[in-house]
Image (cartoon, helix red, strand yellow):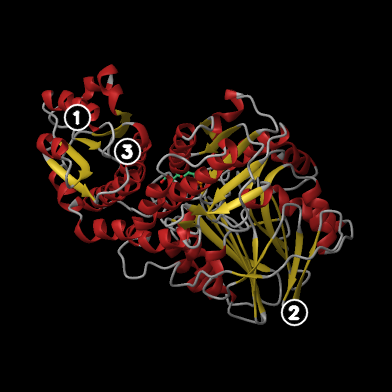
């Protein structure tokens, strides 16, 4: 997904800091990069297809330094990744330079009008209409701020835009449906799509709202609404340090983030559950918060959807009707929604367009909405009626790992609160479950210390395909195991409900398709029956099971052991083993693990 960075400071230093910002945005996925720097006269633009290293090579002989500039990593939506399509884009005169994230839906119409009036376009992008519209407004005599405002009034779609011009020493920016944050430091300001972009320089952040227009100059910033009214936005200090956003000695962010899970889970749980009394303390959700709720719907995508499936199952078992929907299918599913339906958006980034669209649809139908997210100040957190933060810390690897674990734990706590509020009673075994949750950080650490996932990944590295099965609370874990495996190893992997194997997928099972079967200590006999079906076709079986799961150990060719815990919590542990399996399988194949092809961390288009 595209990333924006802007830097406003003294007379020099912009190029280096913009490049740092661009590198920090790499995790979002990109296929070209560029920047525009002002050093006295007009903005000078350098942009290149491919890696940021290409841009650096070009910069070595093309642009002198300056104090002010904008930069961009592009993930193609209109037109292929080429130098010409890379951002920044300029007008006919080269006086206006723009970077943009999102989609301008009416660009076709705007482009043909501009072309009729004599503007020349040099790219296939939707973005390029923006500098030309600004150019026209400047020609009409507008100052840059008015020209910028008049331009954005003409745009429809979702976007974050930042602009510099040859007319003054300022950056103009706005957002509508795409993220944009302001970083405030001593004598320096930054604008970016995401906080880690400027975390090397400041941790003081202003989260901008949709419609905000911000003008940033070396000596200050001013935020106004779309109507020009002054608005105040608080400066918040984030507790993410640059070390958090770096690889910290691991080969990949993904491995680092897998290893961060004990700490992340401690953060998720901190102060929220008391196993001794069975009490739950969820900061914004005291007892009684959800008394009027009749049903719950989860909307989410990918890994977050798998967490939503776990959440829905937990609630249903506790007596609260609940369903999980793929956010992109929510509009067509048209489930009944009213003011007694709580719609929960599960989204690590809080910026996933499909999830935001589903949440907006729920709001329009009168339902209360709640975001379960990792990013304070994200669009989902701000647009929903309430937010529960999973507190996993920044996740840079494209493949979600620690955030899945923290989502599941957050949903277990939220689920317990919901069940109590809606049914008036605790769930069966609530204290035991809370006890198991509080032990999770230590149990995950045991897995990290003793896993044999690397050996198992090596053992089956030449297989034709990889199947993952589980039932009940670990059916979503089977889906998640397969998603992780395919997305980073590029090998064919599928997840099935264990009982479904015999209804079709068994036709694919051969001695070259290992089956990874997840056992929790509940309904293991049935899953064992499914394992035998696979074994009868010659498939090797790897059980992910507790050390004392005799049945599973007896039939499996290999075992990835999980510590003894409550069956409802075992899935988180099994999933950690599967994360490690995927990681090592991809590493053996030398895949670009943190940035799998064709994927982006934050998917901000529907
Ligand atoms: C897979 C993965 C994606 C995301 C999905 C939703 O490893 O990371 O499937 O889970 O794109 O993203 P969020 O949670 O940010 O809404």
- Residue 19 spot, x, y in % from top left: 51, 69
Residue visible at 78% across and 39% down in the picture:
113
In percent of width and height, residue 18 lies at: 56, 69
Q: Decide which of tag 3 and tag 1 comes sooner along the chain.
A: 3
Ligand 1 near label 1 (Cβ, under 8 Å)? no
Mark identifier at residue 482: 3
- How crowded pointer 1 is (Cα within 10 Å; few <14, some 14-19, many 20+) is rated as many
Mark pair 2, 1: CA separation: 68 Å
Which residue in the structure is indicated by mark 2? 219
Q: Which is nearer the N-term, disc 2 or disc 1?
A: 2
- Within-10-Å neighbours for mark 2: few <14, some 14–19, many 20+: few
**Distance between the Cα atoms at labels 3 and 2?**
51 Å
Secondary element under disc 2, as helix, strand or loop, is loop
Q: Quickly name the residue at label 1.
A: 528
* Relative depth, front residue between 277 and 566: 277
In the picture provided, is 347 more to the left or to the right than 230?
A: left
Q: Are marks 3 and 1 in contact (CB under 8 Å)?
A: no
Q: Which circle, 3 or 1, is nearer the viewer?
A: 1
- Disc 3 and disc 1: Cα gap in Å? 19 Å
Residue 556, image x, y percentages:
13, 37
On the image, the x and y values in percent for residue 164 come to 71, 65
Left/right placement of residue 195 relative to residue 51 reads right
Residue drawn at x 86%, y 58% as measured from the top left: 228
């Amino acid at each position: 997904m595209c990333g924006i960075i802007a830097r406003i400071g003294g007379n020099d230093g912009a190029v280096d800091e913009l490049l740092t910002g661009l590198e920090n945005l790499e995790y979002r996925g990109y296929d070209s990069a560029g920047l525009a720097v002002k050093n006295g006269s007009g903005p000078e633009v350098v942009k290149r297809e491919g890696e940021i290293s290409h841009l650096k090579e070009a910069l070595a002989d093309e642009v002198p330094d300056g104090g002010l500039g904008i930069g961009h990593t592009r993930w193609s939506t209109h037109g292929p990744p080429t130098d010409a399509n890379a951002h920044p884009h300029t007008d006919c005169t080269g006086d206006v330079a723009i970077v943009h994230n999102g989609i301008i839906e009416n660009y076709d119409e705007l482009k043909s009008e501009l072309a009729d009036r004599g503007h020349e376009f040099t790219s296939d992008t939707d973005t390029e209409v923006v500098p030309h519209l600004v150019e026209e407004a400047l020609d009409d005599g507008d100052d840059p701020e008015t020209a910028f405002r008049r331009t954005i009034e003409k745009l429809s779609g979702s976007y974050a835009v930042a602009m510099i011009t040859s007319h003054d020493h300022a950056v103009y920016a706005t957002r509508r449906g795409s993220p944009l944050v302001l970083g405030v430091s001593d004598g320096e300001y930054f604008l970016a799509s995401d906080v880690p972009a400027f975390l090397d320089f400041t941790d003081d952040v202003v989260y901008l709202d949709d419609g905000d227009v911000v003008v940033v100059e070396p000596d200050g910033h001013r935020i106004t609404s779309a109507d020009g009214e002054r608005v105040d936005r608080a400066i918040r200090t984030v507790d993410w340090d640059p070390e958090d956003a770096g690889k910290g000695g691991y080969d990949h962010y993904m491995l680092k983030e897998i290893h961060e899970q004990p700490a992340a889970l401690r953060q998720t749980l901190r102060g929220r559950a008391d196993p001794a009394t069975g009490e739950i303390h969820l900061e914004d959700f005291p007892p009684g918060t959800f008394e009027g709720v009749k049903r719950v719907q989860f909307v989410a995508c990918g890994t977050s959807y798998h967490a939503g499936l776990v959440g829905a199952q937990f609630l249903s078992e506790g007596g609260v009707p609940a369903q999980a929907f793929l956010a992109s299918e929510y509009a067509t599913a048209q489930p009944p929604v009213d003011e007694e339906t709580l719609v929960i958006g599960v989204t690590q980034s809080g910026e996933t367009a499909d999830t935001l669209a589903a949440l907006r649809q729920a709001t329009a139908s009168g339902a209360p909405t709640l975001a379960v997210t990792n990013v304070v100040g994200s669009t989902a957190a701000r647009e929903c009626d309430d937010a529960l933060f999973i507190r996993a810390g920044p996740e840079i690897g494209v493949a979600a790992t620690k955030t899945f674990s923290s989502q599941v734990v957050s949903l277990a706590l939220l689920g317990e609160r919901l069940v109590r509020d809606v049914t008036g009673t605790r769930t069966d075994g609530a204290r035991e479950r809370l006890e198991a949750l509080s032990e999770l950080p230590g149990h995950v650490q045991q897995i990290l210390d003793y896993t044999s996932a690397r050996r198992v990944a090596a053992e089956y590295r030449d297989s034709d395909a990889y199947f993952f099965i589980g039932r009940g609370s670990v059916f979503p874990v089977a889906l998640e195991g397969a998603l992780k495996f395919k997305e980073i190893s590029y090998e064919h992997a599928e997840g099935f409900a264990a009982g479904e194997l015999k209804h079709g997928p068994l036709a694919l099972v051969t001695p070259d398709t290992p089956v990874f079967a997840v056992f929790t200590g509940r309904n293991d006999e049935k899953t064992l029956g499914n394992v035998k079906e696979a074994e009868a076709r010659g498939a090797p079986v790897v059980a992910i099971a507790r050390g004392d799961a005799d049945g599973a150990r007896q039939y499996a060719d290999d075992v990835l052991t999980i510590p003894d815990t409550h069956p409802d919590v075992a899935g988180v542990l099994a999933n950690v083993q599967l994360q490690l399996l995927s990681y090592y399988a991809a590493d053996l194949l030398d895949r670009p693990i943190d940035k799998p092809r064709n994927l982006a961390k934050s998917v901000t288009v529907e």
